[in-house]
Image (tube, rainbow, N blue to C red):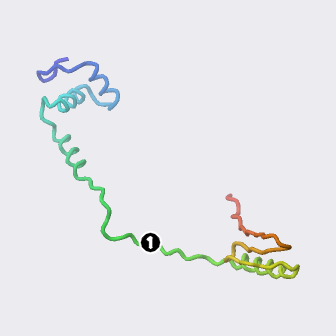
């Protein structure tokens, strides 16, 4: 097909029209611009300028990290305290108690760990 005095491939035009969903004249302009046969339109120049201005650099100052305040679960703490007294009552040697999560102990020469997990209520 002849467009603005240049020969443009019909197959290439169809490919651009289908893939980019543009008109035939827009496809011809785009093809000729890419081949350097015509000057780019103002829209194409603006799009290229915007692409050139993008900068992906790391900032000089570090990000502020959000300070997360840990909520103390008193129920879990009480349960582990009760479990510790129960284990000591049967003769177990409590070796470690991690904050509201687990308790490690030895009983009759073997090492054991209880891990306490609080499950969330189901979503409605």
Q: Quadrant of residue 77?
A: bottom right
Q: Could you tell me how many numbered marks the image carries?
A: 1
Q: Hey, which residue is sitting farthest right in the picture? A: 90
| Residue located 33% across and 31% down the image | 21
| Residue located 26% across and 23% down the image | 13
Nearer to me, 76 or 111 = 111
| Residue located 71% across and 78% down the image | 97
Return the x and y of residue 73 as percentages of the image width and height. 68, 76
Point out the image quarter for the C terminus: bottom right
Q: Is residue 26 left or right of residue 123?
A: left
Q: Is residue 46 left or right of residue 115?
A: left
Check the image and report above or below for 54 versus 73. Answer: above
| Residue located 67% across and 59% down the image | 123
Q: Is residue 34 left or right of residue 15?
A: left
Check the image and report above or below for 108 versus 32. Answer: below
Return the x and y of residue 71 as percentages of the image width and height. 61, 76
Q: Hey, which residue is sitting farthest front in the picture? A: 109
Return the x and y of residue 4 as percentages of the image width and height. 12, 24
Q: Quadrant of residue 34?
A: top left
Q: Quadrant of residue 72?
A: bottom right
The local crowd at label 1, few if under 14, some if 14 to 19, many if 20 or more residues have their Cα within 10 Å, is few
Check the image and report above or below for 115 versus 47. Answer: below
Secondary structure of the residue carrying tag 1 is loop
Return the x and y of residue 112 as percentages of the image width and height. 78, 69
Q: Which residue is mark 1?
A: 65
Nearer to me, 80 or 51 = 80
Nearer to me, 33 or 94 = 94
Q: Is residue 49 left or right of residue 76?
A: left
Point out the image quarter for the N terminus: top left
């Amino acid at each position: 097909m002849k467009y603005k005095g240049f020969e443009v491939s019909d197959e290439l035009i169809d490919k651009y029209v289908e893939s980019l969903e543009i008109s035939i004249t827009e496809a011809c302009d785009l093809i000729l611009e890419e081949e350097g046969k015509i000057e780019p339109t103002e829209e194409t120049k603006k799009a290229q300028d915007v692409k050139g201005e993008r900068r992906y650099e790391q900032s000089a100052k570090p990000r502020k990290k959000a300070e997360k305040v840990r909520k103390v679960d008193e129920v879990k703490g009480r349960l582990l305290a009760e479990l510790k007294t129960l284990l000591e009552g049967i003769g177990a040697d409590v070796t470690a108690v991690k904050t509201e999560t687990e308790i490690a102990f030895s009983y009759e020469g073997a090492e054991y760990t209880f891990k306490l997990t609080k499950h969330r209520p189901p979503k409605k």
